[in-house]
Image (cartoon, rainbow, N blue to C red):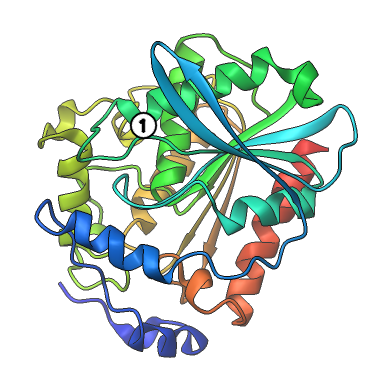
Amino acid sequence: MKLDYSKIDRELVSALEDFPALDLDRENIVKMRELLAEQANPPSLSKVQEERRTISTEGRNIPIFIYKKTSRKNQPAVLWIHGGGYILGSAEDERAKTIAEFCDCTVISVEYRLAPEHPFPAGPDDCFFSLKWLHANTEELEIDPEKVAIGGASAGAGMAAGVALMNRDRDNFPLCLQLLLYPMLDNLHSTPSGQYTNHPVWKRSTSFNAWEMYLNGTPGEAASPYAAPSRASSLRGLPPAYLSVGSEDLFRDEDIEYGRRLLDEDVPCEIAVFPGMYHAGEGFAPEAKISKRLNQSFLVALYDALN
């Protein structure tokens, strides 16, 4: 099946000329990281304090970035998990800085281990330990332990959802929100939107390759819910959620279904579907009206949850 590109918001179309859909597999992942790194890290527009730190657990070190707007005491916090299909990306994330500035909060962005070199559960383990470290050091970090959110975009949002499940089943540290921006939740893509083969930016074949690298195989329905939250048998007891996705995103229907399941299991969830938006389109066309609406929507939702 082919996606009808006429459904894409007209302000987002031109950006696709400069960024065709990614083709990723085990053979080219290292080279693709190098190419994308050359285009990364433009000058930041956010005015926040930045600290790089390394936290240690069980003989391994986890780099983190700590972003703050101010040094006021007892401020809310967000554990931020960057996107990149579980195989790409960096914790030095402009969106993490934007969140710190808009919400006047502490954002801890985790440089978790990436697949395929470090398949599941390496990444979620790093993020869950970072959550434990955050809660063990709230006094030093000047954080209110009752006002901590977890969130991410794309695979980062999928990992945030998985870590929220992991946290529920283990230590159950208080979380006031799961911020899930077009999360990568379902290793099967068995929904109607998952059948299209030509989605912009993140297409079906690349997504399956990324899942295979992350899961170190194709376990199908047997995949751990901590890796693929759509596989979870129950979502009851999770923190409230904000979930957004574009109408022209490969993940659209799996995300809407996850939000519906949250609501069915008495977890408060705001679901926002942005018409004409493809995967991460707001990052490629930030001045488009629909991009501004998407960004404003999640920032306000997060601000309200933290305050």
Residue 208 location, x and y as percent?
Answer: 17, 51
Q: Residue at x 38, y 47 (%)?
A: 155
> Measured along the vertical axis of the image, is residue 216 above or below residue 284?
above
Report the number of discs: 1
Residue 171 location, x and y as percent?
Answer: 53, 9
Q: Which residue is drawn at 54% across and 51% down?
A: 92
> Measured along the vertical axis of the image, is residue 164 above or below residue 1?
above
Quadrant in the rendering for residue 75: top right
Quadrant the N terminus occupies: bottom left
Indicate the secondary structure of the residue bearing disc 1: helix
Is 205 on the left or on the right of 184, as rendered? Answer: left
Quadrant the C terminus occupies: top right
Q: Residue at x 38, y 13 (%)?
A: 59
Q: Which residue is drawn at 45% across and 54% down?
A: 182
Q: Mark 1 points at which residue?
A: 123
Question: Viewer-proximal residue, 174 or 101?
Answer: 101
Question: Viewer-proximal residue, 134 or 264?
Answer: 134
Quadrant in the rendering for residue 28: bottom left
Residue 99 location, x and y as percent?
Answer: 69, 51
The answer, for residue 177, to whether it is visible in the render is no
Question: Label 1 crowding class (10 Å Cα cut-off): few <14, some 14-19, many 20+?
Answer: many
Is 44 on the left or on the right of 167, as rendered? Answer: right
Is 109 on the left or on the right of 278, as rendered? Answer: right
The answer, for residue 89, to whether it is visible in the render is yes
Q: Mark 1: which amino acid?
A: Gly
Residue 275 location, x and y as percent?
Answer: 50, 73
Quadrant in the rendering for residue 239: top right
